Image (tube, rainbow, N blue to C red):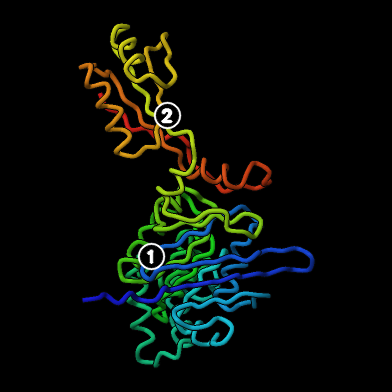
Amino acid sequence: MTTRLSPPAITATGLCKSFGDKTVLDGIDLNVPRGTVFALLGANGAGKTTAVKILSTLINADRGTATVAGHDVAGDPDGVRSSIGVTGQFSAVDNLLTGEENLILMAKLNLIGRAGRKQVAAELLERFDLTEAGKKAVSTYSGGMRRRLDLAMTLVGSPRVIFLDEPTTGLDPRSRRGLWQIVRDLVADGVTIFLTTQYLEEADELADRIAVLDHGRLVAEGTPDELKRRIPGGHVEFRFADVHGFDTAVRAVGSGTPDPETLTLRVPSDGSLRSLKALIDRLDADTLEVDQLSLHTPDLDDVFLALTGTGNTTQPATRPATQKATTR
């Protein structure tokens, strides 16, 4: 019995776009499975927003083809628009209206009947924890509340593909994490999320697959772990309680960087379970007692800097680069 694979939510082949003599997208290819989060990373000006605008039919590509939710972006833009939602970098809400009125207006634009508009608004206000604020003018909302309302408005038409273009820019950490949970809930319901972000932690937390865009070209694509394994610099650090154990380990391993003063041995590692087990087995063969073990694998900070170089004047916001798992 064969299993029929569902078509991807988004595809792009050879997508190109220039503004004057500046090439913004230079032949990018994309394939985004349904019900996943796909993150597009890149510095300011790398082409992230341009890609979103083409895929959401806001502008035309110069060359190349693309489909979204099974509809050709150039040949069937109305079909694309009926299947997607877009949340841009800036909230598309009316400050003079209440949260409820904004949602009712969006329901009207989506041709939802008069009887159903209030019900849709009430359900979305509750889902996004805005029921109490629903009767208040949006001008009184905090940044996090405005972003939640903006995303709620995107969901009025029940889209199966949502483009989130840097949705958490300017939000405090609590609001950002709240929006992350909303994204996870949407994906659990089968929605596909196309995310552009400058926050590497955000991509690491949410994305099933990540593509790195640099000067209009895709320079890498894969799962977060796959991208991290491509970058050298991972290592395991062992610390020993006495000189005898330290000296024996240095001889047993035969590689790495020993530090006699701190009795530590740093050994290159790709972070995989297989390589870590092989290393521990070599130490265990000599019945060595390890006082402390620390594992460092390259993170998305390292990936981004390695793939795009250091010449970018504006780089994505990052989190601390070192991640350690320590046992005693």
Q: Quadrant of residue 263?
A: top left
In the image, is 288 to the left or to the right of 65? left
Q: Tell me the crowding category of disc 2: few under 14, some 14 to 19, or many 20 or more residues within 10 angstroms, Cα based.
A: some
Which circle marks residue 268 in the picture? 2
Position above or below: 181 against 239: below
The answer to which quarter of the image holds residue 218 is bottom right
Q: Is residue 311 left or right of residue 20?
A: left
Q: Nearer the viewer, mark 2 or mark 1?
A: 2
Residue at left offset 40%, top offset 12%: 262
On the picture, is 128 further left or further right than 314?
A: left
Label 1 secondary element: loop
| Residue for point 23% across, 16% down | 286
Query: Of helix, strand and loop, which one carries label 2?
Result: strand
Work out whether residue 116 can be spotted: yes
Q: Residue furthest right?
A: 21
| Relative vertical location of residue 279 with respect to residue 15 in this rendering, above or below | above
